[in-house]
Image: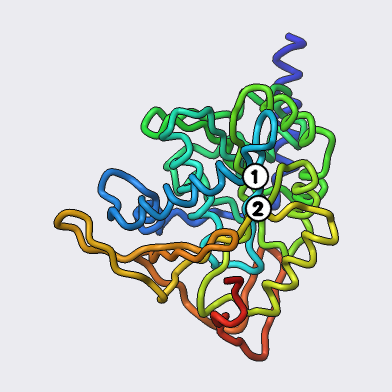
Amino acid sequence: MAKSESVAKKKSLKEKFFSRDKKQKDNDKKDIRRNIISDDTHFSVTEAYKAARTNLMFTTASEKGCKKIIITSSVAKEGKSTTSTNLAITFAQTGVRTLIIEADLRRPKLHQYLDLPNENGMAEYLGGFIEDPHEIVQHLDKYNLDCITGGHIPPNPSELLISPAMEKMLEIFSEEYDYIFVDSPPINIVTDPVSIAKLMTGAIIVVRQNYTTSDSLQQAISALEFGEIKILGYILNSSADMRDYTYNRYKYKYGYRYGGKQYSYRYGYKYGYGHAYRYGNYRSTHTHRVPYSHSNQEK
């Protein structure tokens, strides 16, 4: 009897805690999933991610134990979550123990990308409604990948992400995985990425050509450097500067920017432009936007 009362009480507290939870839009799930690499993905895209994987493995080779990598961007709509998911899948395909964590608790999308239930996730564990972090891990046989979704949208995501529970969870999983990827919010909008990154091996910044401004990128870099976060590299998304290659009968273009070398790959989708954006309860408006030119990129 006492146990049933305890369960009912915990359920009531959970409902109260997530009472401000927003309805998550799932209407565009199919459009989102088509950007996740699979057997049908074009050869150029998979090769770009494999090249990024190789460079990242070499970059972190000197680090002992689990490599914990946070992936962020300067602002929203730069392809950060897509890149995080595809990079984690690419690593898992090699057989290394890989975990991807949704830390963007204001706009969680990992469950949509991977078609997973999102009833219990990061918010439920960090909020104290689930004691064992293993209970929120979901395994995908298709990718040989473990995932932790965001769960319900909490009223206090920043406080949850810097809580002792977050650090404890990373300590536990660092003993069980070779690579942990953390998809974080854009660094220029909220401070969450810097707080989380202090627990990481390093950070990767996703940059979108003709969308990311040089000022916003520099602001993101400065924020990470101020927090003494190691920047492992940059991935250039939606690049129009591409080189041609021929492999047997396949002719393709691809590449990416990572560290000091430039490559590029193009996804099969577009983002809308515009000067205003909303992120959770945060809204920002820009008076002008300057394309991110090659002169501002590292050669």
Looking at the image, is mark 1 or mark 2 earlier in the sequence?
1
Q: Residues within 10 Å of mark 2 (few under 14, many from 20)?
A: some
Q: Position of residue 66 (x, y in %)?
A: 66, 31
Q: x, y (%) of residue 125?
A: 71, 32
Residue drawn where x is 67% and y is 90% of the image: 287
Residue 171 is left or right of residue 237, and the answer is: right
The residue located at (79%, 67%) in the rendering is 222
- Which quadrant holds residue 120? top right
**Quick one: 191 or 284, which is closer to the camera?**
191
Residue, disc 1: 69
Work out whether 233 lies above or below 96.
Answer: below
The answer to whether the residues at label 1 and label 2 have Cβ atoms under 8 Å apart is yes
- Which quadrant of the view contains residue 34? bottom left
Residue beneath the point at 74% across and 52% down: 230
Three-letter amino acid code of the residue under disc 2: Leu
- Dot 1 alpha-carbon crowd within 10 angstroms: few under 14, some 14 to 19, many 20 or more: many
Q: Position of residue 114 (x, y in %)?
A: 44, 43
Disc 2 element? strand
Q: Quadrant of the N terminus?
A: top right
Mark 1, mark 2: which one is toward the viewer?
Answer: 2
Q: Residue furthest left?
A: 249
Q: Residue furthest bottom?
A: 287
Tell which of 268 and 15 is nearer to you. 268
Q: Is residue 146 above or below residue 273?
A: above
Q: Position of 211 compared to 266: left or right?
A: right
Q: Amino acid at mark 1?
A: Ile
SS for tag 1?
Answer: strand
| Residue under pointer 2 | 232
Question: Disc 1 to disc 2, how far (Cα)?
Answer: 9 Å
